[in-house]
Amino acid sequence: MTVLEDQSRFLRCVGEPTRLQILKLLAEGERCVGELACVLNKEQSLISHHLRALKECNIVKERQEAQKVYYKLTDARLARLIIDCEALMKELLLCKCQEVNYGKEENQRGGEGEICPDS
């Protein structure tokens, strides 16, 4: 895989809303699946599914303590990335459009579509 492909895979992985919520919580510190499920009000099986995807991308790592498995970010820079991303969203008003226009009209004209087109 190229660096560009790796970056794209990483962004797709962290871009899923439940995974992003998990990462925001893990940016605060290590947590077990039960804690994450409780805070996010989601089933443990769903949280485990998302943690597995994050683990496969090397974004989180686990450690077992007795019957519980605890998860944390693999690198402190990931916490900073999550925090900075949220700040950018608020400060720069990024991605405020209701939808992205990748319609047939643009493709027929040979364009690649517009993000946040003027209406």
Image: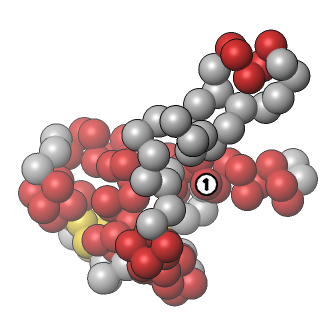
Q: Nearer the viewer, residue 85 or 61?
A: 85
Image quadrant where residue 34 sits: bottom left
Query: Is there any visible trace of residue 110 in the rendered image?
Result: yes
Please rate how many residues cluster around mark 1, counting C-alpha atoms within 10 Å: few if below 14, some from 14 to 19, many from 20: few
Q: Residue furthest front?
A: 119
Determine which residue is flagged by label 1: 11
Q: Is residue 49 above or below residue 68?
A: above
Q: Secondary structure at mark 1?
A: helix
Q: Is residue 66 left or right of residue 76?
A: left
Q: Residue at x 74, y 23 (%)?
A: 106
- Residue at x 85% of width, y 59% of height: 3
User: Residue at position x 56%, y 84% from top?
Assistant: 77
- Which of the 4 image quadrants contains residue 43? top left
Across and down, in percent, residue 94 comes to: 50, 62
Toward which corner of the image does residue 68 lie, by quadrant?
bottom left
Location of residue 32 in the rendering, given as x and y in whole percent from the top left corner: 24, 66
Q: Residue at x 78, y 19 (%)?
A: 107
For this view, does 45 lie left or right of residue 105?
left
Q: Residue 19 placed where, x, y %?
A: 39, 53
Q: Amino acid at mark 1?
A: Leu
Vertical order, 97 against 102 (above or below) = below
Nearer to me, 104 or 85: 104
In depth, the one of 13 and 36 nearer the eye is 13
Left or right: where does residue 119 sit relative to residue 114?
A: left
